[in-house]
Image: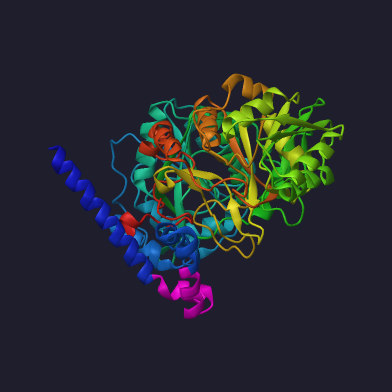
Amino acid sequence: MSDQIVNQNILASARKRLRLLKFLIQSRVWLVRDAGGVFKFLASLVTGVRVAGGRATIQALISQAAFVRKNDPYLYAEWLKRGEPSRVLLSPEPVVGNSVKHGVARTTDILIFLSELDKKIVLELIRSLSEIDSFDCVYLISQGCSELKSILRAHQVDFSVEILRPVDLPVNEKLRCSRAKANKNFVILHTPGAVDRRFIKECSRLHAMKVDAVFCDHDECKDGRRVKPFFKPGYSQELLWDPSYAPAVSVSRDVFDISIETVDFMDQRNSTLKGYEIITKCFQSSVQVQHLPKIYVHLFRSVMRREEVRDMYNSTRPNSFLDLSHAASTFPEQYRLPGYAFKISFVIPTRDKLSLLSECIDSILANPPDGDYEILILDNQSVENETLRGLAGYGLLESVTIVECDYEFNWARLTNDGIRASSGEVIVLLNNDTVVRSSRWCDRLAWLALEQGVGVVGALLLYPRGEIQHAGIVVGYGGYADHIYIGEPIVGRSDEMFVSPLVRRDVLACTGACIAFSRKTFEKLGDFDESLIVAGDVEYCIRSYNAGFRNIFDPSVRLIHEESETRNPGLPESDKVQLRQILKKQLEFGDPFYNPNLSLSSRSPMPSLSVVM
């Protein structure tokens, strides 16, 4: 039996490699075009093999191919062929008499918010609803009620439907009676679309298990074809402002009741914005939230632009939040102020390479925090005379302390020694090869780190040429964990099938090259694991998550990172062995803030090759 399992694993591995090879061959035109021609592509390939090795070069090629093809509809169409139909099967006309099954208990009402009354979309909505037999009543909410009623009168429907203005929602008698039923659930869409009956069925089951809110992945339906998938991470509070994160949600009656009572229905915002507000409040009122990584919703039009929602979201936040949003913001750059003074301790290990350290220190001094701070330089056996003289000079500064660490490099041990020598309420760990590139960067990190329930906060790190070096870590990459979006540009980004690297979100882990956490969090979690030479940052973030804390990636905090300039790159073998044990649960069940439909062979999100090929 064991030999059979081994043979099956070998066969599966061989098939995976063949699929990857086929994908690269299919991507050759995109790769050559992106490189600027055949000769430049071959030159970069040879250079990559010589510098990083063949395996790393192939992995980089796969990620590059995924990035340049991310808007190629073929990938999603092929993924759908292996899983489910790529066409949304809708009847040519509204079906009469075939969907309502008498005697079947239906516990779900559907609320759909309509802003622009496009007749084609309304008819698509009717057709899709006619094929679902598991709901009780549909509420179409729009400011243009009379126009909507005239469209429905011209097309007979066989399901119960109510047409309301947003202001009528809390007082409508039928909805009030529905809300009085103990086992009632509500599916809410702030953007019209087709809802798969399996979504309603799974949500009913989960609500019976006391799950408050359920959401799923979605795509768009254009002329009957499914396009633009959005494969989402698990529940992330940081993404609630994004209208594309949850255009559809199913909530329990209790959550719906609490949320509906806190909405100002006299506010004359358009219906879609009102729907978004209700969905957001439902999430905020929920204790148990479940993400279904299945594409059960097919939108008939694109969701609102982020800018439309950002202004409304900003206006609903309490005064304790500081809004640093600006015209180029890709998300509401808001921070809850702690309401008291605090000190930040910067902890920076270094070994020689004074020029790198000087750039790092100078960038901190040029962009200091608003309040008190200290810089602790951990000298890990520097021997160069220039470095020793430079460290002596820095030691004369009132805000700088030199900590002698005369032992072999161990990032976790260095970090622990630095934290013990520090006195700040917030700890910011920095590599000596980082350079600050954003204003108020350390205040942003500190404000998030001091929020209740937040564990570790990470930053957007860029290579010197401007490509992404770190935008969060995904567990499962390379059999261990690695950076998502690595090597990709931050400008000119188009539609994403996963969360953009320029949007703040919850993550499982961040790189220790720049992370922040409060001293209270450190005291609860304990020291970094010194049995790990390099990977102590990943272990610490996993420990933080398992202890119930949220880890956050904030791309508005930006630094340049040379990466491994003062040590050998990569993980030691001892770290790899131990990390596999630490990550065992996440490797088995998947990173909760990634999506199981996305490939772990590519650092640029794309549909899983196990399905595509």
Image point (46%, 67%), residue name: 69
Image position of 24 with respect to 539: above or below: below
The image shows residue 515, relative to residue 10, as above or below, that is above
Q: Is residue 514 left or right of residue 294?
A: right
**Observer-nearest of 564 and 605:** 564
Residue numbers of the magenta segment? 27-46
Is 109 in front, or is 29? 29
Name the chief secondary structure element in magenta. helix
- Viewer-nearest residue: 20 or 444: 20
Within the image, what quadrant is residue 428 found in? top right
Q: Is residue 43 magenta?
A: yes
Q: Is residue 269 visible?
A: no
Give the residue displayed 66% in from the left and 21% down from the top: 520
Q: Position of residue 26 (x, y in %)?
A: 36, 71
Residue 30 % position (x, y): 46, 73
- Whether residue 197 is visible here, answered yes or no, is yes
Residue visible at 32% across and 66% down in the picture: 22
Q: Judge whether residue 467 is colored magenta.
A: no
